[in-house]
Amino acid sequence: MARNLMQWFCQTARSFAAEKSGQVAIIFGLSLVPSILAIGCGVDLSRAVMVRQRLGVALDAAGLAVGGTVGLSDAAMTEMAQKYFYANYPDAELGTVTSLTVTKLTEDGNVLSVAGAAKVETAFMSLIGIGYMDVSVDIEVTRESKGLEIALALDNTGSMSGSKIEALKTATTTLINILFGQETVNEKLRMSLVPFSQTVKVDTATFLDNGWMDINGSSSTARLNFDNNKYAFSVWASMSNKSWGGCLEARPNGYEELDTPPSAATPDTRWVPYFEPDGPDSSAYSGYTTYVSDGTTGNQEKRLKRSAKYSGKSLNNPNNDCNMQKILPLTSNKITLLNYVNGMVATGYTHIAIGAGWGWRTLSPEAPYTEGTTYDDPDWQKALVLMTDGLNTIDSDSTFHKSKYTAYNYLVRSLLGTTSASAAETAQDNRTMLVCDRMKEAGIRIYSILLQENSTRAKNLMKDCATDLSLYFESPSADDLEGVFEAVATDLSNLRLSH
C-alpha cells in the first residue's frame, strides 16, 4: 500500500510538472516529497518498534524457561530457549529472526544472557536505499535460589554388597557434585546422609551427652533381653573395655514413626542402644548366633537373657551389624559429604521405615538433630531421597525367638504387633507409609528410588511413598543408578529456584 501511494505521488508530481499553467501546483507537489517520505520512515520505524516488542516478549519466555532449569549443557539451554522463543514468536509474525543465543555471564551459571535479533523489511525507506532494519534485544536472567535441605536415606543392607554399593557411591557423588557445582560450601544448600539397614548408627558422644539415650533402662523395651533387671548400658558397664557402638533399636509405641524429640518425661521417646544378645550355646537349641558361654542350664529364653555371662568379658559381638557409616547431620560442606559417601558399607537386613524415619529426623527442627529450619520457613524447602534395593524383611527362623535380632528386637517380642514374619513385613510396609505420609504433611518433598527389584509390593510401596509418581524412579541395573540420581539432582536444583 505504501509503495502504491508513492507511485501515485510520483505520477501526480510528473503531471503537475507537465502542466505549464500550474507553476504553483508544481512547487506544492514537489514539496510533498520530503513530507511523505518522512511519514513513510515513521511507518517503517513503528514496524521495527513492534518487532522489538514482540522479540522482547518471546525472549522473556525463553529466559524464564532456561533460568528455571539448571544442569543443562550449553546446547540443551539453546534448544530449550528456541522452543519457548518460537512458541511465542511464530514464523507468521512480522520480522525475520536472524539469531538467538544463550550465554552464561557467571561461572556458576546463575546469571544468563538471552539475546535475539531480527530483520524488518522496509516499505518506504527502501526508496532511499535502506531495504531492511536490524532489531535486537538482550535480556539478563538472574537465578535467585531458595534454601534447600535434603536428606539422603540410602539402603546399605547386605544385598547392596559388591557392585551395588559401589554404584550407589558413584551415583550419590554425582548428585552431590551436581547440586554443589563448583562450590565447596553453599550456605543455601544443606544435605544429610542416612545409611540404613536393620538399624542406623549415630555419634555416640553426641547422643549420650545430650540425654537422648535411655541410659537408665527406663524404656518399656530396655530390659527385654536381660535378666536380673539389667539393661544394655548396665551390661556394658560390667564388661571389660567394651561399650555401645552407636546403633539403635526402634522406639516403641509409635514413636519411631514420629519426629518427637527424646524426653526424660516420656522414657519411650529415648533410644535404647542396639545390643545383639548371645544366643543359647546348647546343642539342643540350634539356629542361634553364639559368642560366649551361657554359664547356665535351662531353656532358650533363660540362656539368652543371662546378663552375668557378659561380666568381665571383652566382646565386640553385641555391636554385630553395627559397622555401617554413621548418620551425617545436615551440612553445607561438599567435601564432608563426599568423604562420608566413600565410607558406606553393606551390612544387615532391610528396614525401610527406620531409614525413612531417620531421614526425616535430620530434616526436622526438633532434637536429636536441630540443624533443620522450621517447616513453615518460606525461604527454605525440604526434600528426602529414599533409595532401596528391596522389600522390608524379617530374617525369621525356627528358634524360640523366631528371628534374628534387629532394631525391632526379636520377632517373639512382638514389637511390630505380631510374631508372624509375613505380618511383620506388612507392618513394616505400613510404618514406612506412615512416615512418608507424615513427611508429606509437613511439606517435605519425597523422591523414591527402587534398584533392581521387580516385586509389585516393593513398587507399590515406593510409588506411594513418593510425593507424586513423577518423583518415583526405577533403576533396572546398578549401572543405571547414576542416571536416576542425575535426574533427581536436576529436579532438586530446579526446586531451589524462585519463580
Image (spheres, rainbow, N blue to C red):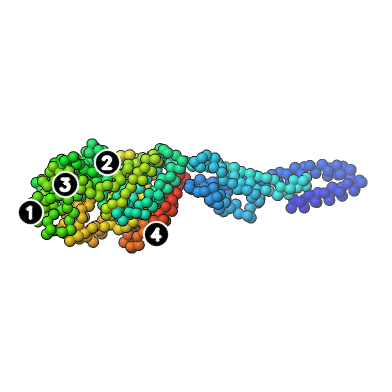
284 or 176, which lies in front? 284
Question: Which residue position holds label 2?
Answer: 203
Let me know if residue 403 appears in the view: yes
Vertical comparison of 143 with 155: above or below: above
Mark 1 or mark 2, which is nearer the start of the sequence?
A: 2
- Nearer the observer, disc 4 or disc 1? 1
* Residue 30 drawn at (x, y percent): 83, 43
Question: Which residue position holds label 4?
Answer: 476
Instruction: Determine the residue located farthest toward the top in the rendered image.
Output: 209
Tell me if 492 is positioned left or right of 431 in this view: right
The residue positioned 19% from the left and 41% from the top of the image is: 242
Label 4: state its secondary structure. loop
The residue positioned 38% from the left and 49% from the top of the image is: 169
Q: Identity of the amino acid at label 4?
A: Pro
Q: Identity of the amino acid at label 3?
A: Ala
Mark 2 or mark 4, which is nearer the start of the sequence?
A: 2
* Residue 95 drawn at (x, y percent): 66, 50
* Residue 426 drawn at (x, y percent): 25, 59
Tell me if 491 is positioned left or right of 208 in this view: right
Q: Identity of the amino acid at label 1?
A: Thr
- Nearer the observer, disc 3 or disc 4? 4
Task: For marks 4 and 2, give the CA distance.
Answer: 34 Å
Q: Identity of the amino acid at label 2?
A: Asp
Mark 1 or mark 4, which is nearer the start of the sequence?
A: 1
Residue 297 tag number: 1
Label 3: state its secondary structure. loop
Question: Which residue position holds label 3?
Answer: 222
